[in-house]
Amino acid sequence: MITTAVIAFREFLEAFLIVGVFLGISKRLNLSRELEIGIAATLGFVISILLASTTFIFGDVARGVLTEERAEILESYLLIFSGFFIAYVVFSLHNIIRMGRGGKLISAHRKLAKNAFDISLFLSIVMLVVREGFEIALFTASTSLFAVFLQNFLGLMSGFFLASVVGALAYFTYIKFPIGRVFRATEYMIILLGAALVQNGVTELLEHSFGIHISDIWQFPLQFMPSKDSIIGHFLRNMVGIDSEFSLARLGIMLAYITGIYLVFLRKNKPAV
């Protein structure tokens, strides 16, 4: 749920910012295209939510076919895969997708100057928003297997709601949000999520497949931590990667992951979004 919410917030926020650009142009130039843009954006958001929800449904079906033993082993591999896959799509593939989106934005802006209803403009806005939904479905394809449909859907809608609040404040009150910093913060959150996923995956894989309990290697005295089955414990384990059985060995896995992601994706300074 948490992973889905973070990814949904990031992608939906970008969609709201795109729609905000069109609404701002229409309003400043007195083109009266707000209704048309609003309908197109609403349709795009509905399709996006349906795309992501379909991914969650397939996750539920796949999880129901597996036996408990196979599910635990598969979950270990998927946790590791998800940790690296999330980093890749956010820091690498996402930039490629955004570059392809730039040309469509420019051509769509030019069409706003026309007074008549333009079906190509309408569909362009729909597709620009839907692409964000496709990215959410793509990015959560593996992580959605770790939660039931309702949890994933709540995460999706939480991200959508938070993104809509930020987008609405930015448009209606003309507050200059440091959007670059918002996206940078979500990148750091995704790195931490990835580190937690990989660390949990390696821990479970070694335990179930090889009988190696790395939680016992230089274990931290974290008896004050809540149970991993509680809500807070579940959050800390999946978001931050720590629980009452945390150890230096597990910390080492997380640090190795973070170092690798930094060297591959973040070492070179990137321009702000």
Image (cartoon, grey):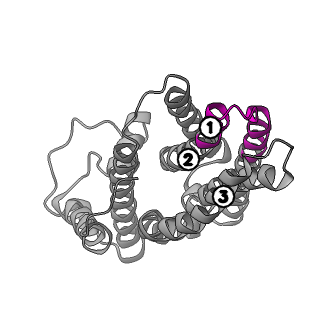
Q: Secondary structure at mark 2?
A: helix
- The answer to whether residue 68 is seen in the rendering is no
Q: x and y percent of residue 219 in the render?
A: 16, 55
Eye-nearest disc, 2 or 3: 3
Q: Does residue 99 lie above or below 224 as drawn?
A: below
- The CA distance from mark 2 to mark 3 is 12 Å
Which region of the structure is painted magenta? 21-44
Q: Which mark is residue 74?
A: none
Amino acid type, callout 1:
Met
- Tell whether label 1 touches label 2 (CB within 8 Å): yes
Q: Which mark is residue 157?
A: 1
- The answer to whether residue 112 is seen in the rendering is yes
Q: Secondary structure at mark 3?
A: helix
Amino acid type, callout 3:
Arg
- Mark 1, Cα crowd under 10 Å, few <14 / some 14-19 / many 20+, is some
Amino acid type, callout 2:
Ala
Q: x and y percent of residue 178 in the render?
A: 36, 39
Question: Residue at label 3?
Answer: 131
Eye-nearest disc, 1 or 3: 3
- Mark 3, Cα crowd under 10 Å, few <14 / some 14-19 / many 20+, is many
Question: Residue at label 2?
Answer: 8
Along the line of sight, the residue nearer the viewer: 226 or 127: 127
- Tell which circle, 1 or 3, labels the residue nearer the N-terminal end: 3
